[in-house]
Amino acid sequence: MVMVGAWLIGVGLGTAGSVAAQADGDPNPFESEADPFAEDSEGAPAEGTTGESGEELPPPTVPDGYGSQPSQYPQPQGEPAQGYAQPGYPQPGYSQPGYQPRARRQRIPYQEGMEIPPGASLVEKRRIGLVITGAVMFAVSYGLAVSLYTDILDFSAWMLVPVLGPFVEVGNDAFGSGAKFIFALDGLLQAGGLALFIGGLVSKRQYVEYWASDEPGWRVAPRFGVGGGGLDLRATF
């Protein structure tokens, strides 16, 4: 117990002495140590300050390569410079094709027993020639009968009846033999034209059809017949 009390008394005296020393104005032991970097910072003159003679000191110089950025970066090699158009390529041209001969359809009337060559076909068509011939014949003869009826008042209304009307006027005693002959001929023409027209529409004819080139010049064309075939020399203009 005596030893513990003596230790406590010593600690108390030491603490009191340190407090008294701080109260008397002793500096902080940590603040009294010199800053090794303070000399450099204090020794370097600040920008815009003046020296002892009153002249303005120049700003500190900076070594090359520090504190500045390159104003322009070099462009990589192999790329076109800005502002230049890309090289273009011309459009390919196409030439006009030359004259190509076209195939033309040929028809030859088919006869019984005729040999059909390779590449040809057998087709059936209406007889357009008969249709056209009959229509023209009937139109002309009937038009004559109508014109006679309108110009001559002695004709009866039978003259307007197709085919039958002219034959009725043949029995009229008011006309002479010459007029009656014209009436009979007109009636025959009307009947023949109407028959050809109807026959062309109803009946059909067979043809051998093939395709041939229409290029101008001489060419050899096949010829077909009942007794056999052959070749014809034809010219196209």
Image (cartoon, grey):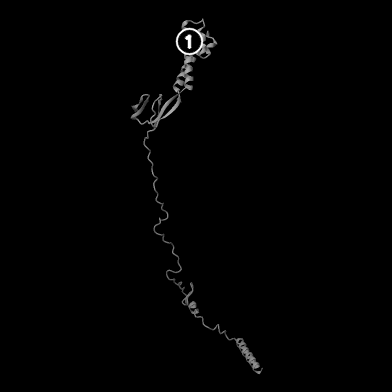
Name the residue nearer the viewer: 202 or 97: 202
- Residue reaching furthest to the bottom: 2
Identify the residue at horizontal 45%, vertical 25% (top origin): 125
Q: Which residue is mark 1?
A: 184
| Residue 237 visible, this angle | no
Q: Position of residue 99 (x, y in %)?
A: 37, 35
**How many dots with numbers?**
1
Above-or-below relation of 86 to 59: above
* Quarter of the figure with residue 68: bottom left
Does 15 sit above or below residue 134? below
Q: Give how far across and how far down residue 74 sits, in percent.
A: 41, 61
| Residue sitting at x 43%, y 25% | 206
Q: Is residue 164 visible?
A: yes
Q: Would you identify the image quadrant in which residue 20 lies? A: bottom right
Of 143 and 93, nearer the camera is: 143
Within 10 Å of the Cα at label 1, are there few (<14), some (14-19), or many (20+) other Cα atoms? some
Residue 55 higher or lower than 148, as above or below: below
Mark 1 falls on what kind of element? helix
Q: Quadrant of residue 158?
A: top right
Q: Please provide percent x and percent y for residue 203.
A: 47, 22
Q: Between residue 151 and residue 112, name the one nearer to us.
A: 112
Residue located at (47% from left, 5% from top): 177
Q: Given the image, on which type of amino acid does mark 1 rest?
A: Ala
Quadrant in which the C terminus appears: top left
- Name the foreground residue: 90 vs 170: 170
Judged left or right of residue 5, residue 138 is left
Q: Is residue 96 left or right of residue 32?
A: left
Q: Position of residue 138 (x, y in %)?
A: 48, 17
Q: Quadrant of the N terminus?
A: bottom right
